[in-house]
Image (tube, coloured by chain):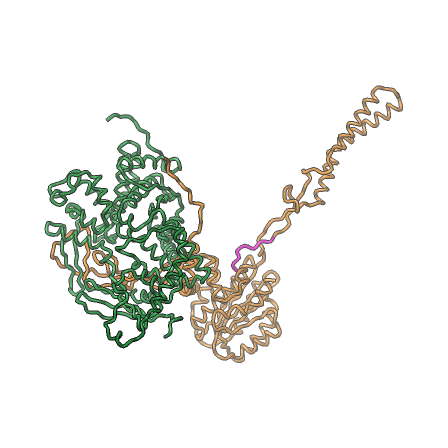
Amino acid sequence: MTVRIVDRRQDSKNKSSINRSRFIHRFKGQIRKAVADAIAKRGIRDLDNGEKIGIPGKDISEPHFRHGRGGKREAVHPGNDRFNSGDEVDRPQGGGAGQGKGRASPDGEGMDDFVFTLTRDEFLDIFFDELALPNLVKRQLARIDEYKRVRAGYTQSGVPTNINLVRTMRGAAGRRVAVSGPYGARLRELQEELDRLRRDCPGDPDIERIEREIACLKARREAIPFIDPFDLRYSNRIRIPQPSTQAVMFCLMDVSGSMDEQKKQMAKRFFMLLYLFLNRNYEHIEVVFIRHHTAAEEVDEDNFFHSRETGGTIVSSALKLMHEIIATRYSSATWNIYGAQASDGDNWNDDSPVCREILSESILPAVQYFAYIEITEAEPQNLWAEYERLQGSHPENFAMQRIGGPEDIYPVFRELFRKRLV
Amino acid sequence: MTKKRIRPIAEGSDWTYEAIERYDNEIGRVAKAYGLDCYRHQLEIITAEQMMDAYASIGMPVYYHHWSFGKHFLETENRYKRGQMGLAYEIVINSDPCIAYLMEENTLTMQALVIAHAAYGHNSFFKGNHLFKQWTSADAIIDYLVFAKNYIAQCEERHGFDAVERLVDACHALMNLGVDRYKRSPRLSLEKETLRQKEREAYLQAQVNDLWRTLPRQDEAVAEEEERRFPEEAEENLLYFVEKHAPLLEPWQREVVRIVRKIGQYFYPQRQTQVMNEGWATYWHYTLLNTLYDEGKLSDGFMFEFLQSHTNVVYQPPYNSQWYSGINPYALGFAMWRDIRRICAEPTAEDREWFPDIAGSDWREAFDFAMKNFKDESFVAQYLSPKLMRDFRFFAIQDDDSKPKLRVNAIHDEQGYREVRRRLAEQYNLGSSEPNIQVWNVDLRGDRSLTLRHFVHERRPLGRDTDAVLDHLAYLWGFTVRLEEQSPSGSVNLVSERKSEKRRRGES
């Protein structure tokens, strides 16, 4: 009797994926926190990867009744190299070898984090979840490849619906001309010969032969098909990646003393969301970071989020710098320009009207969209009031929002996303 | 011997179906010659991912869904990807036919090793050992798991998966205390199970209602009598008690409790026979493959590869090694089975004194007797020889938290053999290594609270999980749950009390 060997390799792939998603669902709270930590460490352009995250081991342990430490217990161990009956030895420190049969870990403090890797989709899912994005927007942002089908000439094979009649018929006509060409020449020759013979020496036996040949040639010419599979031409379409333009994104942030770490993290999500959006729509994106207190400077991402300044706030300095950079590096004919500004609303009073002026005169005409978020619980100050006037005059490309938590970020982009979705 | 050249069974390290089949035939032939009695078996080729998945669901080919299996899968996957562990070569399922998994990444040699180890070693143990015979129904387990999976999936559809998850969490927490240690469970069968399930639902519910309906009126006279406890005898199977008597559970919830309990029960023999079972399988793969080698059917290259992984499996690091994590059941089991054969075949004077009944007897008979009638605890108590204790250099340590130092109670010497052996056997006694907690009383006349009693052994306290487990129990019970501690002297004190979070139907 031979043994039964069953190949199960093709069976139920990803059988564990249900259990995996249950696990993620169950510990969403902890995972969300871990994702938040991960976001704090990531660059804003780095959103297309999974993430290795750790959640506290004790949170996910499954409880059972078991003994804790203490009491009297005995254990047998192998490898005696020095002990004799009746010896007394010090307790090994730190639950090391020789005692307790490894019971230290379930009860002890030092339980490691449970580390695992979220896939890109799971990561984005949690990121979006926090931002309370509508589903349609989530789908649009999470989609990796967006292709457009464009016409690309003609092919000789394809599906019947794609047959291109004009091309096919033109080819058929050409083929008929080409194939019947030699017959036509020969026919004309024979006809001339026949005419000559009939005229000069009727009764020549050649006449009959030539007539037969002519009939034969004509029959052959008739037999050339009007249309042949060889003539068929199909319209060809190929898929090319959709985004084919370039964009530049300006991140403006107030880094004066009142912007604490938490506010910066909130601002970071705001920038990330805009970046993600642009990433789906443009092939090439540059990001410019401008931070400001009383003076503005262009910095790299690390300095942007992680250095701290003190002192007053003059918002117009950043807007001026942005305008200068646009003028020198991104002339708006070839660049799609997006601006995102985050602040806690503080500004030097006399400066706010200046800000409005710069925005409405120089910046808004040049940009696709400019979004402003104010991360504060306090009453709005004069900067907010000035910006509100802008919202009235430029409703199509200026948006502003006061933000308490990450779920408030999305509304500031609502118009932007809506336009793109149509 | 003649120099007749015998061709090896197969060449090369990549496996093919034909090669696996040839190996299986040859190994089966040798196993039969040794008189191993096995279930029919079936070999299944699986991928590494499927192997990890099988790990996560305790090796079962079908299982219900639960987040904890996702967690175990991630754990395994992480360690595997980081290269911290190789996957186990084999998983074998105690079913009839016995299913052994072969991982596609393994070399041909490893496949042969797995076939010998699992499909003949473990398989014969499952068929012969009294615990497996008594507690498990190999022919019905797969059917039962299918039933369980479908039933739980249905419950999820009907009651929402959060509710089911909450319930299964609670059951898992009590799974260790969901086994009958002494009674035999009735046989499982899919059709019967499905047929009876409806009936049982109605019946169980009626039983429970009865329990509460027949509450005697609060007569003064009765109150003066000494209150009778319910249950009258302490019940050690917590899950069973919950299934039968928890007042507020819905019928489907009782069924889920029963499913978790049944599956826990099914694994109980495996937990009790780890050393014996792994040792037995290791002994037989070693013996079967060596026999084939002696017949000239295996190449030297095969043997080198085989011996390397065999040696890794049976390595026992000493207590002070950084790799030490307790006694390796493969090492101890393998050594003990080999030792039994040695005692039978070439006994020393010492062996004759210690093992008069097997020294010099037929080793195959001694083997079968030991394999059929013991579990780890009694196996060690019966067969651990002084020679092995010397080989392993065993020593027994006492850790008493009331004393400043650890004490070495016995070592591998003339005075210590019996002591070391007794202590090692005790170490494999699940009854004493797990806390002894039983259902003590239900306050039928009062607040319906459930009282558990922990019988403290050697002053060992309960771990920190205790409150979390009690919360789970309180969820199942529906009313307050208490845990008392009874010391050997008889004094009782309350350790913990958890109020139930739900009291939907209970009038408070």
Q: Residue B79: within the magenta?
A: no
A16 relative to B354 in the view: left or right: right
- Point out residue B210 in the picture as x, y percentages from the top left corner: 35, 66
In the rendered image of the structure, the colour used to display chain A is orange
B477 relative to B372 in the view: left or right: right
- Point out residue B286 in the picture as x, y percentages from the top left corner: 26, 40
Q: Could you tell me which quadrant the N terminus of chain A lies in? A: top left
Q: Residue A147: within the magenta?
A: yes
Q: Quadrant of residue B225?
A: bottom left
In the rendered image of the structure, the colour used to display chain B is green
Can residue B334 be seen at all in this image of the molecule? yes
- Point out residue B78 in the picture as x, y percentages from the top left corner: 37, 54
- Point out residue A391 in the picture as x, y percentages from the top left corner: 59, 74
**Front residue of A81 and A346:** A81
- Residue A193 vertical position relative to residue B206 in the rendered view, above or below: above
**Front residue of A318 and A372:** A372
- Residue A214 vertical position relative to residue A137 in the rendered view, above or below: above
Can residue A285 be seen at all in this image of the molecule? no
Question: How many numbered marks have been drawn onto this rendered protein structure?
Answer: 0
**Front residue of B480 and B406:** B480
Q: Could you tell me which quadrant the C terminus of chain A lies in? A: bottom right
Q: Which residues are drawn in magenta? A: A141-148
**Front residue of A312 and A100:** A100
- Residue A146 vertical position relative to residue A322 in the rendered view, above or below: above
